[in-house]
Amino acid sequence: MTSHLSGITAARWPKYLPAGIAALAVWWLVYRNLAPLAAWFTYSICGLEQGTRLGATVEFFVFESPKVLLLLALVVFGVGIVRSFFTPERTRRILSGKSEFTGNVLAALLGIVTPFCSCSAVPLFIGFVTTGVPLGVTFSFLVSSPMINEVALVLLFGLFGWRVAAIYLGTGLAIAIGSGWIIGRLRMERHVEEWVFQTQTGAAGADAEADWPARIRLGGDAVRDIVGRVWFYVLIGIGVGAGIHGYVPENFMASIMGKGAWWAVPLAVLMGVPMYSNAAGIIPVVQALLGKGAALGTVLAFMMAVIALSLPEAIILRKVLKPRLLAVFFGVVAAGIAAVGYLFNAIM
């Protein structure tokens, strides 16, 4: 055995271990006591009465805000370390040279852990296409990367349990794999803007292998970057969810987002497309909708449409896709999301 443990020297390892254990212990202590702290703040410090709409709204907000941010910080730190293993060049090498369906599956799986969103669509699309990655495989990645992200998975697990998180993961992967495969079968390469194929990408250089201290710093940088960018949207989402929780009458949402109306799922998808939010901002709203009687399939379709399909994404992708391919992409993904909504409304 060498004197290094996965890149951390024996001298460095003891410095990280106690600090990491202490940080996790503090995190767990705070997380476990959020409910009584929220009740104490709402009813003792603020003097609100239990059972009132305002009291329920304030308690929901005070409880959910630190809960979501704590979950977000922990998972972003962990995935920031995981992401250090997946540079763009390494991702391209993994996807190149595979059979089409295998490539679709690998691309969808890589989309879960790679640090790309719709803002990265143009350079990633160019890089994938010009290095020989099939068009359908590229689309599997572009669907999976924003839709199935670590933030959504961990927050869903923390708020709703493993079953809903697993449903989201499984259906998101199915949509990403299926939509990429369908687009690949349509052979629409001619509907990619010509300049994309004329772009020359440099030869892939060797990926520098970061040591563990560097990976830990990357995890901390990811927390500062991602949490720093989304915390405001998180609080807005929780504020909306708190208002729904406190003031929307019981079962009201069931009348417009329930299982009974056939139009509820496509309406939820159409409502989600113009919205621009991330998983951290929309999931507290989802939680409140489910609590008021909305059907799981309908709400899941709404959430997926908000995360995976948006007008800003369409504007960005229009730089590399001709209108017909862009419309096919949005149509196939929207149809897959609607199918998921109908399926889970039928079985749950």
Image: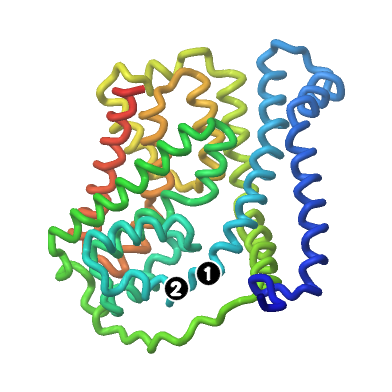
Q: Secondary structure at mark 2?
A: helix
Q: Is residue 116 above or below residue 252?
A: below
Relative placement, left or right, of 211 versus 300 is: right
Categorize mark 2 by other alpha carbons within 10 Å: few (<14), some (14-19), many (20+).
Answer: some
Disc assigned to residue 88 = 2
Judge depth for marks 2 and 1 and give the one in front.
Answer: 1
Q: Are marks 2 and 1 in contact (CB under 8 Å)?
A: no
The residue that disc 1 covers is: 85
**Percent position (x, y) of residue 186?**
13, 59
Categorize mark 1 by other alpha carbons within 10 Å: few (<14), some (14-19), many (20+).
Answer: some
Residue 342, picture quadrant: top left
Quadrant (top left, top right, bottom left, bottom right) of the N terminus? bottom right
Given residues 117 and 10, the one toward you in this image is 10
**Percent position (x, y) of residue 4?**
69, 76
**Percent position (x, y) of residue 264?**
31, 26
Q: Is residue 291 above or below residue 31?
A: above
Relative placement, left or right, of 176 versus 65 is: left
* C-alpha distance separating marks 2 and 1: 10 Å
Q: Amino acid at mark 1?
A: Phe
